[in-house]
């Protein structure tokens, strides 16, 4: 679906404006994203060089207009008046001198919710020791009439840069105060101390301009910043409203879309929020990104992605997300091929390659993972992605201490790098350091609540501590986020069984069978003739899950169902059709054969017992017990023959 030339020129213009505007406000990631999307467009056919210099000159003139247009004359005048100071402030920001940047336009101290002892009079009585948030905010606002007056004269661009610099200064100090990864000061207890003051300023700023309802006096940038600090302050509902307002006012700020995506926790949330999004191409990118985050691989997602690829055929972002969708759908070969193609086209691009390293770890493909680690190290050793790739490599060769070291390095570079927290938790599980693993997984879900692997890891950690009710809760969260993975449901079932909830455990195991075999979820799982599992042979079902279900029925003394599921376990050895192959003899199927041999023995089915016991002797599993059964059955049969002879002898 190629765009008409006018629409493509408009899209190019908007992306160019976005690159310039994001760079001016030091939103470098959003600027990079917009620039990459701009250069991934296909030039319209009617704008290609046809030999006419006039057409080329007109095209160049049209495409060179990248200065943002501001329809508000007052804002334009303010920006022109502040230009020299703005350039100086941005230079400070680029040099990471955030406090100096903020001080260019906000020389007076920004109000904080706690202390301004020099400006606030001391208070007597018990109220001085504990103050409610509303009172605190009113106190912090009172002595800042001079600041409020200066804000009225400041352009939105300068105010955004100043407050964003103050926010980054707070993040920097928070990381410095946190010290060591997983140390005593690392975690939610250490907060960004600049956020309360920024909230006070933005609250007053927007309250004076009509709040959420007035869309005429805002460019969308301060709305985005307000949403970010509200999100940091755990005011998620209000943050969602301001971020929605931001993407409607300024749809080409990709950073605002990413913050909004962090608030989408389920497909239902995505469906609900889609009604409030702007009707332009950015909403499609948002849908693709959220679907990948929510592990949705439906045909509609791929349809949207294919349409976007027809407009942006050279987009590494879209190719990366297509590879991620195939990875989450467990199409590992397709995903690996797409990642290889992406690396070939963009050999110095590290974005998303930590997921590729996860894929190579799972396969496992040690040579490719080693090559990927070498490529990432030669590109940039000080990127979180590089250290995650190296950590996966060392984990694959069972050097778990080195793996932990690299995951810690990734987190030292970016404390909010969620993938490193999850992977480090895996390594601590391998090292049997349960407490460190639980804390790592907890930090992972604090950063991204949609990562089912971190929830599953928390379940594993508490299971190792024998806290089965806790592990059940976390396994359920993991299964809700990734209902298409049978491993999640098997974990839920195991936790139910540990909590002595046998009926729930059986249902969860059956759900794992349905998911793993893609059978009808509404089918009956009984042992009757209408049982769809009765024909499930040839490795169609997981024998371990079938065996576990049988053992649960045994715990309930439901011998008929237990024996039926043991028979199903045994049936996985054989091919479903002529010419097809089953799983063959495995440890699990041999255990099921031994159980059935004992069951047949207890029922007096001597011929069936002999048959199963002889098969066990051939399998080489539980040979001694199988020989014992054979010997016992033979003696019983011999005794029966003697008894029959003694009864029939005199008559003869």
Image: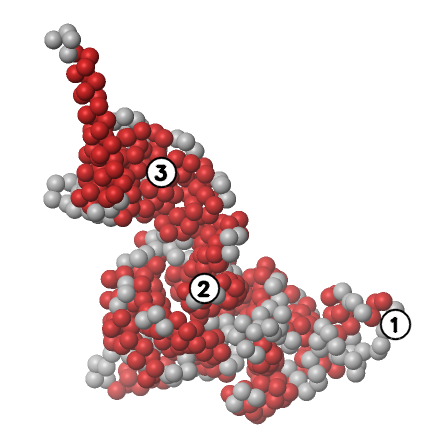
Q: Residues within 10 Å of mark 2 (few under 14, many from 20)?
A: few
Q: Residues within 10 Å of mark 1 (few under 14, many from 20)?
A: few
Mark with earlier residue (1, 2): 1
- Residue designated by label 1: 124
Residue at the top extreme of this rendering: 651
Q: Residues within 10 Å of mark 3 (few under 14, many from 20)?
A: many
Please say whether residue 451 is visible from this viewpoint: no
Q: Quadrant of residue 124?
A: bottom right
Q: Who is closer to the viewer here, 65 or 541?
A: 541
Which secondary structure lies at badge 2?
loop
Which secondary structure lies at badge 1?
loop
Q: Are marks 1 and 2 in contact (CB under 8 Å)?
A: no
Marks 3/2: CA distance?
Answer: 31 Å
Mark with earlier residue (1, 3): 1
Image position of 96 with respect to 594: above or below = below
Q: Which dot, 1 or 3, sits closer to the camera?
A: 3
- Residue designated by label 2: 432
Image position of 86 with respect to 571: above or below = below
- Residue designated by label 3: 550
Marks 1/2: CA distance?
Answer: 53 Å
> Where residue 433 sits in the image (x, y, percent)?
48, 65
Figure colour scheme: secondary structure
Q: Which dot, 3 or 2, sits closer to the camera?
A: 2
Q: Are marks 3 and 2 in contact (CB under 8 Å)?
A: no
């Amino acid at each position: 679906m190629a765009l008409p030339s006018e629409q493509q020129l408009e899209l190019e213009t908007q992306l160019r404006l976005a690159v310039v505007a994001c760079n001016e406000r030091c939103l470098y990631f959003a600027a990079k994203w917009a620039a990459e999307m701009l250069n991934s467009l296909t030039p319209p056919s009617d704008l290609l060089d046809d030999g006419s210099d006039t057409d080329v000159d007109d095209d160049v003139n049209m495409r060179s207009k990248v200065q943002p247009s501001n329809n508000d004359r007052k804002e334009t005048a303010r920006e022109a008046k502040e230009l020299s100071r703005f350039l100086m402030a941005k230079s400070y920001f680029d040099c990471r001198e955030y406090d100096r940047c903020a001080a260019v336009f906000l020389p007076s101290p920004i109000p904080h919710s706690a202390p301004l002892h020099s400006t606030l009079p001391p208070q007597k009585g018990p109220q001085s020791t504990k103050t409610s948030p509303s009172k605190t905010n009113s106190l912090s606002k009172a002595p800042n009439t001079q600041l409020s007056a200066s804000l009225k004269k400041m352009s939105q661009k300068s105010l955004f840069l100043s407050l964003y610099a103050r926010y980054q200064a707070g993040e920097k100090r928070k990381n410095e105060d946190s010290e060591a990864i997983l140390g005593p000061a690392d975690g939610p207890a250490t907060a960004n101390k600049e956020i309360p003051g920024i909230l006070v300023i933005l609250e007053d700023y927007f309250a004076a301009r009509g709040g959420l309802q007035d869309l005429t006096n805002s460019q969308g940038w301060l709305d985005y910043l307000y949403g970010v600090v509200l999100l940091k302050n755990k005011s998620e509902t209000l943050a969602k409203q301001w971020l929605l307002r931001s993407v409607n006012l300024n749809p080409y700020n990709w950073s605002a879309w990413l913050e909004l995506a962090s608030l989408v926790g389920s497909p239902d949330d995505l469906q609900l929020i889609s009604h409030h999004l702007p009707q332009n191409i950015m909403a499609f990118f948002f849908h693709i990104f959220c679907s990948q985050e929510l592990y949705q691989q439906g045909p509609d997602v791929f349809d949207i992605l294919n349409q976007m690829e027809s407009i942006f055929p050279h987009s590494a972002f879209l190719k990366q997300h297509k590879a991620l969708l195939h990875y989450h759908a467990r199409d590992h070969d397709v995903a690996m091929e797409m990642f290889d193609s992406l690396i070939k086209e963009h050999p110095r691009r590290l974005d998303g390659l930590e997921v590729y390293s996860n894929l190579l770890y799972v396969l496992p493909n040690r040579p490719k993972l080693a090559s990927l680690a070498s490529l990432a190290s030669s590109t940039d050793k000080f990127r979180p992605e590089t250290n995650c790739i190296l950590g996966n490599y060392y984990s694959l060769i069972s050097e778990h201490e080195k793996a932990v070291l690299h995951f810690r390095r990734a987190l030292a570079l970016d404390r909010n790098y969620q993938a490193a927290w999850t992977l480090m938790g895996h390594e601590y599980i391998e090292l049997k350091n349960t407490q460190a693993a639980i804390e790592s997984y907890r930090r992972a879900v604090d950063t991204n609540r949609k990562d089912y692997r971190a929830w599953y890891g928390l379940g594993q950690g508490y299971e190792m501590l024998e806290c089965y009710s806790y592990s059940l809760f976390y396994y359920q969260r993991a299964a809700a986020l990734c209902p298409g993975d049978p491993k999640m449901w098997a974990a839920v079932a195991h936790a139910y069984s540990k909590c002595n909830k046998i009926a729930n455990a059986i249902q969860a195991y059956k759900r794992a069978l349905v998911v793993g075999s893609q059978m009808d979820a509404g089918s009956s799982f009984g042992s009757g003739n209408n049982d769809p599992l009765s024909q499930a042979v040839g490795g169609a079902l997981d024998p371990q899950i079938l065996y576990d279900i049988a053992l649960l029925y045994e715990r309930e003394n439901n011998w008929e169902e237990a024996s039926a599921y043991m028979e199903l376990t045994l049936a996985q050895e054989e091919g479903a059709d002529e010419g097809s192959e089953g799983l063959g003899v495995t440890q699990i199927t041999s255990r099921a054969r031994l159980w059935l041999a004992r069951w047949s023995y207890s029922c007096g089915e001597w011929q069936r017992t002999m048959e199963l016991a002889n098969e066990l002797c051939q399998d080489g599993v539980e040979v001694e017990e199988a020989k014992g059964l054979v010997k016992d059955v033979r003696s019983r049969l011999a005794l029966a023959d003697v008894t029959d002879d003694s009864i029939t002898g005199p008559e003869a």
